[in-house]
Image (spheres, rainbow, N blue to C red):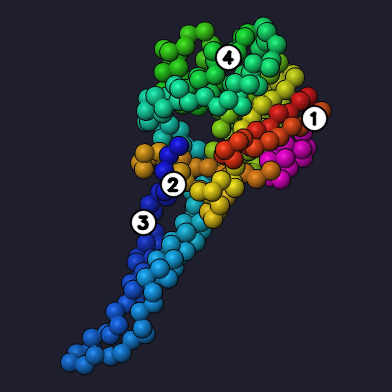
Amino acid sequence: MGTLGFEPRAVGFPTLRIIALELIAPQHICSGAHDVPATPRPQIHTILFKIYYVFKRFMARNMHVSSPEDIIRKLKVSYDKFAEDFANTRKDKEWKEVIEYLKSLPSNITLLDAGCGYNRYGKYINGTHVCMDFSKNLIKISMADYQQSIYVVGNIIDLPFKDASFEYSICIATVHHLPSKTLRKRAINELIRVSRKAIFLSVWYKHQKKFENLPKDVDVMWRKKYFRYYHLYDFKEIVEDIIKGMHYKEIFSFVDYHKRNIYVEIVK
Protein backbone atom coordinates (compact mmCIF):
# COMPACT_ATOMS: atom_id res chain seq x y z
CA MET A 1 0.00 0.00 0.00
CA GLY A 2 1.06 3.54 -0.58
CA THR A 3 1.77 6.17 2.08
CA LEU A 4 -1.08 8.41 3.10
CA GLY A 5 -0.78 11.91 1.74
CA PHE A 6 -2.66 14.62 -0.05
CA GLU A 7 -2.06 16.18 -3.39
CA PRO A 8 -0.73 19.73 -2.87
CA ARG A 9 -3.02 22.51 -4.07
CA ALA A 10 -1.92 26.12 -4.50
CA VAL A 11 -5.22 27.61 -3.35
CA GLY A 12 -5.53 28.11 0.39
CA PHE A 13 -1.93 27.44 1.40
CA PRO A 14 -1.17 31.10 2.26
CA THR A 15 -4.07 30.94 4.72
CA LEU A 16 -2.66 27.79 6.28
CA ARG A 17 0.74 29.43 6.58
CA ILE A 18 -0.75 32.45 8.37
CA ILE A 19 -2.67 30.21 10.78
CA ALA A 20 0.49 28.21 11.49
CA LEU A 21 2.50 31.36 12.16
CA GLU A 22 -0.18 32.62 14.52
CA LEU A 23 -0.14 29.35 16.44
CA ILE A 24 3.63 29.49 16.98
CA ALA A 25 3.90 33.25 17.55
CA PRO A 26 6.83 34.31 19.83
CA GLN A 27 6.32 35.35 23.42
CA HIS A 28 6.78 39.00 22.49
CA ILE A 29 6.18 40.96 19.32
CA CYS A 30 8.81 43.57 18.56
CA SER A 31 7.34 47.00 17.77
CA GLY A 32 10.01 49.60 17.22
CA ALA A 33 12.07 50.06 20.39
CA HIS A 34 9.52 48.44 22.66
CA ASP A 35 8.53 44.85 23.22
CA VAL A 36 4.78 44.33 23.24
CA PRO A 37 3.69 41.35 25.39
CA ALA A 38 1.84 38.69 23.44
CA THR A 39 -0.27 35.72 24.40
CA PRO A 40 1.89 33.04 26.10
CA ARG A 41 3.06 30.29 23.78
CA PRO A 42 0.94 27.11 24.08
CA GLN A 43 2.50 23.71 24.60
CA ILE A 44 4.18 22.23 21.50
CA HIS A 45 1.86 19.21 21.32
CA THR A 46 -1.15 21.55 21.31
CA ILE A 47 0.40 23.57 18.50
CA LEU A 48 1.07 20.48 16.40
CA PHE A 49 -2.42 19.14 16.97
CA LYS A 50 -4.01 22.42 15.90
CA ILE A 51 -1.87 22.60 12.76
CA TYR A 52 -2.77 19.01 11.89
CA TYR A 53 -6.47 19.63 12.54
CA VAL A 54 -6.56 22.79 10.39
CA PHE A 55 -4.67 21.02 7.60
CA LYS A 56 -6.98 18.00 7.69
CA ARG A 57 -10.12 20.17 7.63
CA PHE A 58 -8.72 22.22 4.75
CA MET A 59 -7.89 19.14 2.70
CA ALA A 60 -11.26 17.53 3.40
CA ARG A 61 -13.01 20.65 2.09
CA ASN A 62 -10.86 20.82 -1.04
CA MET A 63 -10.80 17.15 -1.99
CA HIS A 64 -13.66 17.51 -4.46
CA VAL A 65 -12.81 20.78 -6.16
CA SER A 66 -12.12 18.64 -9.23
CA SER A 67 -15.03 17.04 -11.06
CA PRO A 68 -15.51 13.24 -10.85
CA GLU A 69 -14.44 12.98 -14.49
CA ASP A 70 -11.24 14.87 -13.76
CA ILE A 71 -10.46 12.69 -10.73
CA ILE A 72 -10.91 9.52 -12.81
CA ARG A 73 -8.73 10.96 -15.57
CA LYS A 74 -5.96 11.78 -13.09
CA LEU A 75 -6.27 8.34 -11.53
CA LYS A 76 -5.87 6.69 -14.93
CA VAL A 77 -2.82 8.83 -15.71
CA SER A 78 -1.29 7.82 -12.36
CA TYR A 79 -1.81 4.09 -12.88
CA ASP A 80 -0.42 4.25 -16.41
CA LYS A 81 2.69 6.04 -15.11
CA PHE A 82 3.50 3.66 -12.25
CA ALA A 83 2.09 0.51 -13.90
CA GLU A 84 5.39 -1.39 -13.96
CA ASP A 85 6.24 -0.56 -10.35
CA PHE A 86 2.69 -1.44 -9.27
CA ALA A 87 2.77 -4.76 -11.14
CA ASN A 88 6.06 -5.71 -9.48
CA THR A 89 4.53 -5.21 -6.03
CA ARG A 90 1.52 -7.39 -6.90
CA LYS A 91 3.22 -10.45 -8.39
CA ASP A 92 3.50 -12.15 -5.00
CA LYS A 93 0.77 -10.24 -3.17
CA GLU A 94 -2.42 -12.25 -3.48
CA TRP A 95 -5.24 -12.02 -0.99
CA LYS A 96 -6.26 -15.39 0.40
CA GLU A 97 -9.94 -14.40 0.57
CA VAL A 98 -10.01 -13.93 -3.21
CA ILE A 99 -8.09 -17.16 -3.84
CA GLU A 100 -10.46 -19.14 -1.61
CA TYR A 101 -13.47 -17.72 -3.44
CA LEU A 102 -12.05 -18.55 -6.88
CA LYS A 103 -11.13 -22.07 -5.80
CA SER A 104 -14.70 -22.60 -4.61
CA LEU A 105 -16.10 -21.98 -8.11
CA PRO A 106 -16.81 -24.87 -10.51
CA SER A 107 -14.62 -25.72 -13.51
CA ASN A 108 -15.04 -24.42 -17.06
CA ILE A 109 -16.70 -21.18 -16.04
CA THR A 110 -16.77 -17.76 -17.72
CA LEU A 111 -15.50 -15.01 -15.41
CA LEU A 112 -14.83 -11.29 -15.69
CA ASP A 113 -12.15 -9.67 -13.53
CA ALA A 114 -13.19 -5.99 -13.67
CA GLY A 115 -10.37 -3.68 -12.62
CA CYS A 116 -7.91 -6.56 -12.77
CA GLY A 117 -4.80 -4.33 -12.58
CA TYR A 118 -1.91 -6.74 -12.79
CA ASN A 119 -3.61 -10.06 -13.47
CA ARG A 120 -2.59 -11.74 -10.23
CA TYR A 121 -5.64 -14.04 -9.93
CA GLY A 122 -5.85 -15.39 -13.47
CA LYS A 123 -3.95 -18.57 -12.57
CA TYR A 124 -6.67 -19.54 -10.09
CA ILE A 125 -9.53 -19.42 -12.62
CA ASN A 126 -10.55 -22.65 -14.31
CA GLY A 127 -12.31 -21.56 -17.47
CA THR A 128 -12.57 -18.54 -19.73
CA HIS A 129 -11.20 -15.49 -17.97
CA VAL A 130 -11.55 -11.89 -19.21
CA CYS A 131 -9.19 -9.43 -17.52
CA MET A 132 -10.35 -5.80 -17.91
CA ASP A 133 -8.73 -2.60 -16.67
CA PHE A 134 -8.74 1.08 -17.61
CA SER A 135 -4.92 1.23 -17.55
CA LYS A 136 -3.59 0.14 -20.94
CA ASN A 137 -0.08 -0.12 -19.48
CA LEU A 138 -1.17 -2.58 -16.80
CA ILE A 139 -2.96 -4.60 -19.47
CA LYS A 140 0.21 -4.69 -21.61
CA ILE A 141 2.29 -5.92 -18.67
CA SER A 142 -0.30 -8.56 -17.76
CA MET A 143 -0.50 -9.80 -21.36
CA ALA A 144 3.27 -10.31 -21.44
CA ASP A 145 3.33 -12.23 -18.15
CA TYR A 146 0.14 -14.31 -18.41
CA GLN A 147 -1.11 -15.24 -21.87
CA GLN A 148 -3.98 -17.54 -20.85
CA SER A 149 -6.45 -14.71 -20.17
CA ILE A 150 -8.39 -12.50 -22.58
CA TYR A 151 -7.52 -8.82 -22.12
CA VAL A 152 -9.73 -5.76 -22.56
CA VAL A 153 -9.14 -2.06 -21.87
CA GLY A 154 -12.42 -0.74 -20.50
CA ASN A 155 -14.28 1.37 -17.95
CA ILE A 156 -16.06 -0.22 -15.01
CA ILE A 157 -18.92 2.30 -15.07
CA ASP A 158 -19.71 1.36 -18.67
CA LEU A 159 -18.66 -2.26 -19.17
CA PRO A 160 -18.17 -3.13 -22.87
CA PHE A 161 -20.11 -6.41 -22.61
CA LYS A 162 -23.66 -7.56 -23.28
CA ASP A 163 -26.05 -8.49 -20.50
CA ALA A 164 -25.29 -11.83 -18.80
CA SER A 165 -22.03 -12.27 -20.71
CA PHE A 166 -20.34 -14.07 -17.79
CA GLU A 167 -21.34 -16.58 -15.17
CA TYR A 168 -19.25 -14.83 -12.52
CA SER A 169 -17.53 -11.49 -12.00
CA ILE A 170 -14.93 -10.34 -9.49
CA CYS A 171 -13.98 -6.75 -8.79
CA ILE A 172 -11.11 -6.46 -6.31
CA ALA A 173 -10.10 -3.08 -4.83
CA THR A 174 -11.61 -1.06 -7.68
CA VAL A 175 -15.05 0.37 -6.82
CA HIS A 176 -13.57 2.50 -4.02
CA HIS A 177 -11.61 4.51 -6.63
CA LEU A 178 -14.81 6.04 -8.05
CA PRO A 179 -15.35 9.59 -6.72
CA SER A 180 -19.13 9.68 -6.20
CA LYS A 181 -21.86 7.46 -4.80
CA THR A 182 -23.67 7.59 -8.14
CA LEU A 183 -20.64 6.22 -9.99
CA ARG A 184 -19.95 3.54 -7.38
CA LYS A 185 -23.55 2.29 -7.52
CA ARG A 186 -23.44 2.40 -11.30
CA ALA A 187 -20.31 0.23 -11.34
CA ILE A 188 -21.89 -2.36 -9.04
CA ASN A 189 -25.01 -2.35 -11.19
CA GLU A 190 -22.89 -2.93 -14.28
CA LEU A 191 -21.26 -5.96 -12.62
CA ILE A 192 -24.71 -7.35 -11.80
CA ARG A 193 -25.88 -6.68 -15.36
CA VAL A 194 -23.11 -8.68 -17.07
CA SER A 195 -23.11 -11.59 -14.56
CA ARG A 196 -25.52 -14.52 -14.55
CA LYS A 197 -24.70 -16.19 -11.22
CA ALA A 198 -22.64 -14.15 -8.76
CA ILE A 199 -20.32 -11.19 -8.17
CA PHE A 200 -17.48 -11.03 -5.64
CA LEU A 201 -16.00 -7.62 -4.83
CA SER A 202 -13.81 -5.92 -2.26
CA VAL A 203 -13.42 -2.32 -1.08
CA TRP A 204 -11.17 -0.67 1.50
CA TYR A 205 -12.54 -0.65 5.06
CA LYS A 206 -12.97 2.76 6.72
CA HIS A 207 -12.17 1.48 10.20
CA GLN A 208 -8.60 0.51 9.54
CA LYS A 209 -6.46 2.07 12.26
CA LYS A 210 -4.61 4.37 9.87
CA PHE A 211 -7.87 5.74 8.41
CA GLU A 212 -9.93 5.98 11.60
CA ASN A 213 -9.60 9.75 12.03
CA LEU A 214 -9.67 10.69 8.36
CA PRO A 215 -12.67 11.60 6.20
CA LYS A 216 -14.19 8.92 3.99
CA ASP A 217 -12.75 10.45 0.83
CA VAL A 218 -8.95 10.58 0.77
CA ASP A 219 -5.95 10.76 -1.52
CA VAL A 220 -3.58 7.85 -0.93
CA MET A 221 -0.37 8.54 -2.77
CA TRP A 222 1.73 5.89 -4.51
CA ARG A 223 5.41 6.27 -3.53
CA LYS A 224 4.51 9.76 -2.27
CA LYS A 225 4.29 10.85 -5.89
CA TYR A 226 1.23 9.63 -7.78
CA PHE A 227 -2.37 10.54 -7.02
CA ARG A 228 -4.91 7.84 -6.07
CA TYR A 229 -8.41 8.71 -4.91
CA TYR A 230 -10.13 6.35 -2.43
CA HIS A 231 -13.56 6.24 -0.88
CA LEU A 232 -13.41 4.36 2.43
CA TYR A 233 -16.44 2.15 3.06
CA ASP A 234 -18.16 0.92 6.18
CA PHE A 235 -20.52 -2.07 6.23
CA LYS A 236 -23.73 -0.07 6.21
CA GLU A 237 -22.76 1.99 3.18
CA ILE A 238 -21.57 -0.86 0.95
CA VAL A 239 -24.75 -2.83 1.66
CA GLU A 240 -26.90 0.23 0.93
CA ASP A 241 -25.06 0.81 -2.35
CA ILE A 242 -25.95 -2.74 -3.39
CA ILE A 243 -29.50 -3.26 -2.17
CA LYS A 244 -31.16 -0.06 -3.36
CA GLY A 245 -32.67 -0.55 -6.81
CA MET A 246 -30.64 -3.67 -7.66
CA HIS A 247 -31.78 -7.23 -8.40
CA TYR A 248 -30.15 -10.08 -6.48
CA LYS A 249 -31.03 -13.13 -4.39
CA GLU A 250 -28.54 -13.04 -1.49
CA ILE A 251 -25.67 -10.92 -0.17
CA PHE A 252 -22.81 -12.21 1.99
CA SER A 253 -20.26 -9.78 3.45
CA PHE A 254 -17.31 -9.88 5.85
CA VAL A 255 -14.13 -8.01 6.84
CA ASP A 256 -10.81 -9.79 6.41
CA TYR A 257 -8.64 -10.88 9.34
CA HIS A 258 -6.45 -7.76 9.18
CA LYS A 259 -9.50 -5.45 8.98
CA ARG A 260 -8.31 -3.90 5.73
CA ASN A 261 -11.03 -4.87 3.25
CA ILE A 262 -14.75 -5.49 3.14
CA TYR A 263 -15.63 -8.45 0.90
CA VAL A 264 -19.08 -8.87 -0.56
CA GLU A 265 -20.61 -11.71 -2.59
CA ILE A 266 -23.79 -10.91 -4.52
CA VAL A 267 -25.73 -14.01 -5.60
CA LYS A 268 -28.29 -13.58 -8.38
Whether residue 83 appears in this view of the structure is no
Q: Which of marks 1 and 4 precedes in the sequence?
A: 4
Q: In the rendered structure, which disc, 3 or 1, sits on the residue that comes first in sequence?
A: 3
Mark number for residue 10?
Answer: 3
Q: Is residue 79 visible?
A: yes
SS of the residue at dot 2? strand
Residue under label 2, please give it: 4
Instruction: Say which of marks 2 and 3 sits in front.
Output: 2
The type of residue carrying mark 2 is Leu
Report, in whole angstroms, how far the alpha carbon at label 3 lies from the one at label 4: 46 Å
Q: Does residue 243 show up magenta in the picture?
A: yes
Tag 1, which secondary structure? strand
SS type, badge 4: helix
Q: How far apart in space, not on screen, are marks 3 and 1 (Cα)?
A: 47 Å
Q: Secondary structure at mark 3?
A: loop
For marks 3 and 1, give the one nearer the viewer. Answer: 1
Using residue 14 as the reference point, say whether residue 231 is left or right of it: right
**Whole-percent x and y of residue 23?**
37, 74
Q: Residue at x 63, y 18 (%)?
A: 102
**Quadrant assignment for the N terminus:** top left
Residue type marked 4: Tyr
Pointer 4: what residue?
A: 124
By secondary structure, the bulk of the magenta-drawn segment is best described as helix
The residue to which callout 1 is attached is 250
Amino acid at dot 3: Ala
Q: Which residues are magenta?
A: 236-248
How crowded is the residue under tag 3: few (<14 C-alpha within 10 Å), some, or many (20+)?
A: few
Tell me the quarter of the picture where residue 203 sits. top right
